[in-house]
Amino acid sequence: MAKWGEGDSRWLVQERDDGANVNGWHWQERNMMGWGKDRMSELLTAITFELPGSEGAARVVEITKFEGDASVNIRKGNKKFAVFDLSVTCAWEGECVDAEGKETTAKGEIKLTDFASMNDEDEYVYKVTSSDGDKAAKERLKQKIEAAVAPAFAPRLATFAEELADLSLIHPRRCPRRGQVTSHDTPHHSTTTHPP
């Protein structure tokens, strides 16, 4: 055991000329917004909202806005965790059959806010709007989406949160850079902390 005041080199933290963050000892934050937008697009554009009786459907066609923060944080080399606080806007399009049997179309947006790592599912906020198309079609499809959006989005948002958390288990030098990770090559439950 080193004695107080003797300056035992085993207990001294020395500055490095190369500025290297050895073993990730200091706080590191990896921006995951690029990965996040790509993955969120994959997850949400698979969603369809069906009207009863095969009278029509609406679907998420693209992510138009992906704002906020998503990151993997590493502290003192072995304390790793994911943090996110996001606002996501999706465009939807749909069609339905009117009383005369004619197909009409509509489109609009779904805005998700308060999607954050510190929030529970019931704290996420959804706002559905309709912008273009037949008036009746807009109203029917908007009502359908409003009623179904939370249960439709919830499992996919949970997948996003789980996969981002899994990325925090990867050694910081192996943590993917913007746009390099998909669901197919994301390592799961890796606890390796040694340098490659």
Image (cartoon, helix red, strand yellow):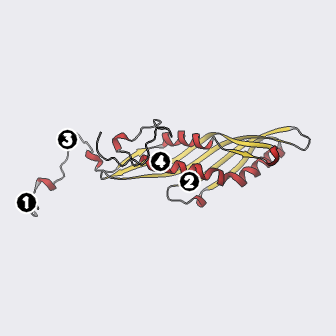
Q: Which residue is mark 1?
A: 6
Contact? badges 2 and 3 (CB < 8 Å): no
Which mark lies nearer to you, 3 or 1?
A: 1
Mark 3 surroundings within 10 Å by alpha-carbon count, few (fewer than 14), some (14 through 19), many (20 or more): few
Q: Is residue 6 rendered to the left or right of residue 38?
A: left
Q: Is residue 126 above or below residue 33?
A: below
Question: Residue 31 placed where, x, y %?
Answer: 43, 44
Amino acid beneath label 1: Glu
CA separation, marks 4 and 1?
45 Å
- Between discs 4 and 2, the one toward the N terminus: 2
Amino acid beneath label 2: Phe
At mark 2, the secondary structure is: strand
Question: Residue 181 placed where, x, y %?
Answer: 47, 38
Nearer the observer, 102 or 16: 102
Contact? badges 3 and 4 (CB < 8 Å): no
Mark 1 surroundings within 10 Å by alpha-carbon count, few (fewer than 14), some (14 through 19), many (20 or more): few
Task: Say which mark, if any, is on residue 35.
Answer: none
Residue 42: quarter of image? top right
Q: Which residue is mark 3?
A: 17
Residue in the image at 19% along x and 47% along y: 15
Q: Which residue is mark 4?
A: 164
Task: Say which mark, if any, is on residue 115.
Answer: 2
Q: Quadrant of the C terminus?
A: top left
Q: Residue furthest left?
A: 6
Q: Quadrant of the N terminus?
A: bottom left
CA separation, marks 4 and 2?
13 Å
Residue in the image at 16% along x and 54% along y: 12
CA separation, marks 3 and 4?
34 Å
